[in-house]
Amino acid sequence: MKKEYIAICDPDAGYAGNLAAFLNRRNTLPCEAAAFTETKSLVKMAGSGSIPVMLISPAMLTDEVKALKTTCRIILLGDDERREDAGGFDQIYRYQPGDSLASKLENFCGRKKSYAEDAGEKAAQIVDNIPAQRDNPQTAPMRMEVIGIYSPVGRCGKTCFGMTLAALLSERKKVCFLNLENYSGLEGIFRGYAEDRDKGDLADLIYLLRRDGEIRIEEYNRILCTWKKMDYIRPVFSPEDIRDIEAQEWRSLLEALDRIGSVDVVILDIGDQIKEVQELLSLCDEIYIPIREDRFSMAKFHQFEKTLSGLEHPQIAERMEALVLPEISDEELKGSFPEGIIHGKMGAYVRSLLRKRERV
């Protein structure tokens, strides 16, 4: 079956690329959006029947493009908010909120099932392809190791610990670090994050999994970022992208990464917005729980321990270890991140932890 795209065509590469990425993250159109900044490749792809709808700047509306209107619905990206058609073509005002623009586009080309409507069905299909739960002894274990870092306590150094652990482990193994928080904050302090802004993020990886039920190695490598020897996937930008991911999909993502075969260890920096977080923790071989020693923080940790006793995953408590991490000063964060913490107190702490675990 030929794959189809909704074309976003504009000479401004930033506008076209950002709009296509937004529409794909929103995931409500019947097919994937693709950005174009010139007409040659657009006409070639549309001529093959792969573009049923295009949203195009009037500046790119050449005679060659107009000739495609018999096989492709052409919608202009107009500058006049009051006009709904121009020269016989439908028009959408380009300078409006993304959700509003997307809704108007859906009126022209249809809307796929909402995620809420479709998630259960897709998740069930994915799970049907998984022979059994990971903790079932009859199931072949993952080749790669999964380390989870989670805490019911805030401001405990969880992300600094996770990145330090990933960086030091990557000196010996192929490590991929995944931040699963709704607001990671890495864009503001991690230089590599900004440098890799065109790579895509975790939401794109989940999109590929939902679309294809699998992640091909070339797609993974396109999204993958590297800092020194540590690989990572950029965290999501929108909190809704994390909140929409079902527990079954985290399992499917990990198993897809394992099948790729190029990852030895995945480190998960797990936030509070994860649905059914205990299900995700049950997939981890080791679980580190950073805590603080004040009375209120300890009360939160003990409450978390009590919730585990009533769950169906006793292995979570068996695999988890509470850690009181060294304080990270603002001065350490003002330097080059994460080098400053790796060569500071946190790095020394993690090296000691790894020596105890005979990892290095």
Image: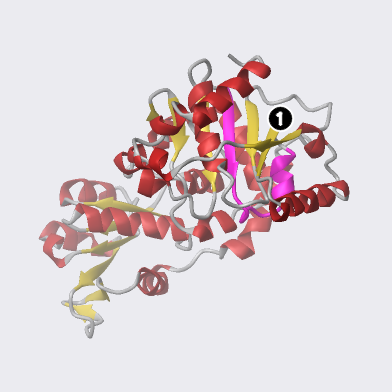
Check disc 1 and report the residue beneath it: 285
* Location of residue 283 by image quarter: top right
The extreme right residue here reads 310
Point out the image quarter for the C terminus: top right
Task: Identify the residue at horizontal 63%, vertical 65% (top origin).
Answer: 117
Task: Identify the residue at horizontal 41%, vertical 73% (top origin).
Answer: 103
The extreme bottom residue here reads 82
Q: Nearer the viewer, residue 236 or 270?
A: 270
Task: Identify the residue at horizontal 45%, vertical 33% (top origin).
Answer: 341
Residue 254, image x and y in percent?
Answer: 61, 35
Report the label total: 1
Q: Which residues are magenta?
A: 263-282
54, above or below 87, in the image: above
Residue 93, image x and y in percent?
Answer: 25, 75
27, above or below 138, in the image: below
Task: Say whether residue 209 is left or right of residue 51.
Answer: right
Task: Say whether residue 204 is left or right of residue 42.
Answer: right
Q: Looking at the picture, which amino acid does disc 1 mark?
A: Asp
